[in-house]
């Protein structure tokens, strides 16, 4: 009887232990699954990639984006010499100051001269011609609001 008692208690203990073990395993697995739902990439356990913060590729791509023929950052029209103009003429003032002025090539050259003498504009080298061409082509002098002068008139002589 005594022996039976002890055996019985032993098996109860064993069953109890097995039960606790299985239960703990279940709890662990569910924790794992729930965490997997919250953070599927298990990113908290991975070494952070120090370069990830600097991956601003998107912004770089948009920096000189052109849409519908307009350089978005400056509002300048797309055309030959656009980037030379952007890089040399939008550093100190808005591109609007440039585009609101309609000049011919000679007056552009004079304006650039004036900025170089008084506003610290640098020597543009070969870009000066490219920029002036760009401006004259894309921002031509506006036509005057008056009708074109008539030039082939047949005058008649007034008779006495
Ligand atoms: C180093 C700085 C700087 C750069 C670069 C620069 N400018 Fe200017 N620009 C100025 C300053 C300063 C003024 C005077 C602004 C004002 O009056 O408020 C000015 C004025 C102007 C004006 C108005 C002139 C007027 O008669 O009112 C035009 C047009 C102009 N710039 C065109 C250009 C063009 C085209 C380029 C590129 C070749 C250029 N700027 C590059 C400094 C600069």
Image (cartoon, rainbow, N blue to C red):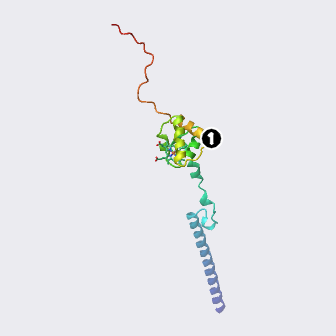
- In which image quadrant can residue 132 be found? top right
Percent coordinates x, y for residue 50 in the rendering: 63, 63
Q: Compare residues 3 and 105 and report the one nearer the observer.
A: 105
- In which image quadrant can residue 17 be found? bottom right
Instruction: In the displayed orientation, state which residue is furthest to the bottom.
Output: 2
Q: Which residue is mark 1?
A: 126
Label 1 secondary element: loop
Specify whether residue 68 is in view: no
Residue at image x 57%, y 64%? 39
- In which image quadrant can residue 2 be found? bottom right
Q: Is residue 96 above or below residue 14?
A: above
Instruction: Name the quadrant of the C terminus.
Output: top left
Instruction: Name the quadrant of the N terminus.
Output: bottom right
Percent coordinates x, y for residue 113 in the rendering: 54, 42
Percent coordinates x, y for residue 15 in the rendering: 62, 80
Q: Is residue 57 above or below residue 147?
A: below
Q: Is residue 141 left or right of residue 13?
A: left
Q: Compare residues 34 and 157 and report the one nearer the observer.
A: 157
């Amino acid at each position: 009887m005594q022996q039976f008692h002890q055996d019985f208690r032993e098996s109860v203990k064993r069953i109890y232990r097995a039960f606790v073990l299985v239960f703990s395993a279940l709890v662990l697995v569910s924790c794992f699954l729930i965490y997997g739902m919250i953070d599927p990439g298990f990113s908290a356990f991975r070494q952070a990639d120090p370069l990830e913060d600097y991956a601003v590729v998107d912004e770089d791509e948009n920096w000189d984006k052109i849409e519908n023929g307009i350089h978005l950052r400056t509002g300048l029209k797309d055309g030959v010499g656009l980037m030379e103009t952007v890089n040399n003429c939008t550093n100190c003032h808005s591109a609007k100051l440039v585009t609101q002025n309609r000049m011919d090539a000679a007056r552009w050259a004079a304006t650039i001269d004036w900025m170089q003498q008084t506003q610290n504009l640098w020597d543009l080298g070969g870009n000066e011609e490219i920029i002036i061409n760009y401006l004259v082509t894309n921002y031509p002098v506006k036509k005057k609001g008056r009708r074109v002068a008539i030039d082939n008139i047949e005058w008649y002589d007034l008779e006495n």
